[in-house]
Amino acid sequence: MSYNMRAMSQLEAMTQMLHRVALFADLSGEEIDFLARRVVLRRASNGEMIFSEGDPCTGLFVVQSGQVKIFKTSADGREQVLLIAGPGATVAELPVFDGGPYPASGSAINEAALFEVRKEDVRQLCLEHPEVALKLLRVVGSRLRRLVAMIEELSFTTVRQRLASLLLRQAQAKGQKTARGIEFDLPWTHQELAAQIGTVRELVSRNLSRFQSTGVIQIEGRRVIVGNPEALEAETKSS
């Protein structure tokens, strides 16, 4: 295959990928083509940092494959996970517009491929097509609402309630009904669970053991069986 043919094939793949991204789904063919000709493909191995909190913003990222974790780190090294983004999701939109550095860090959870859309290209696209800015604003606004909900949850609920909520959401999103209940594989370690709900690993382990001892769930390796979904939902409201 000649160089020109390979370049056209890569351009077509980028165009198709960008069309599937929620942030760019409503853009015209001309707008998508503008971005596809300028994006840069980046690959990251498991645990590799993509950007760090405080770094100057170079652009936003579209996850092509794998998963990316967006997180904050405290002075004592504890992590708070803000978002886990999978294929088709975008991350780091906010600093593209406010001119500041990245407000959080991003790293690959597993092998990941990302398209980087440079800050200058996003801004030029918005200047030439003002309706794009409104589309981007809707996405940023939705992300802000999720962060506000996270702050509310961390401020006004217990660790047990937050853990029960996370398990319930996972059961609803990934669970399969069996004779034993709703079953799903838990993709995170206890440490990673703790980072998502704003606590430490020991409290996650203690509360999981409590849920098992009371018959709310069963755990077999990474397999979780919710035998009593009503009881698990009640745990999200108990004090």
Image: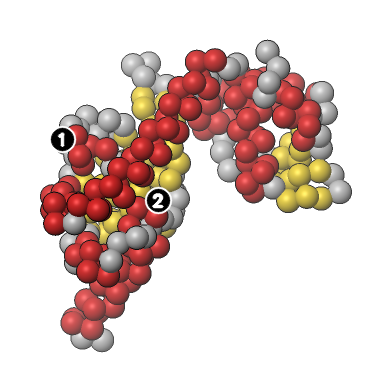
The quadrant of the rendering that contains the C terminus is: top right
Does any portion of residue 65 appear in the rendered image? yes
Q: Is residue 236 left or right of residue 99?
A: right
- Residue 125 screen position, x and y as percent: 17, 55
Q: Is residue 158 left or right of residue 212?
A: left
Residue identified by numbered label 1? 99
The amino acid beneath tag 2 is Ala
Q: Position of residue 117 (x, y in %)?
A: 23, 53
Q: Residue at x 63, y 41 (%)?
A: 170
User: 207 or 161: which is nearer to us?
Assistant: 161
- For label 2, the SS is loop
Residue in the picture at 18% in, 82% down: 4
**Residue 164 appears in which quarter of the rendering?**
top right
Q: Horizontally, is 220 left or right of 102 in the view? A: right
SS of the residue under disc 1 = loop
Res. 89 mark: 2
Q: Earlier in the sequence, mark 2 or mark 1?
A: 2
Q: Position of residue 32 (x, y in %)?
A: 26, 65
Residue that extends furthest to the top in the rendered view of this protein? 239
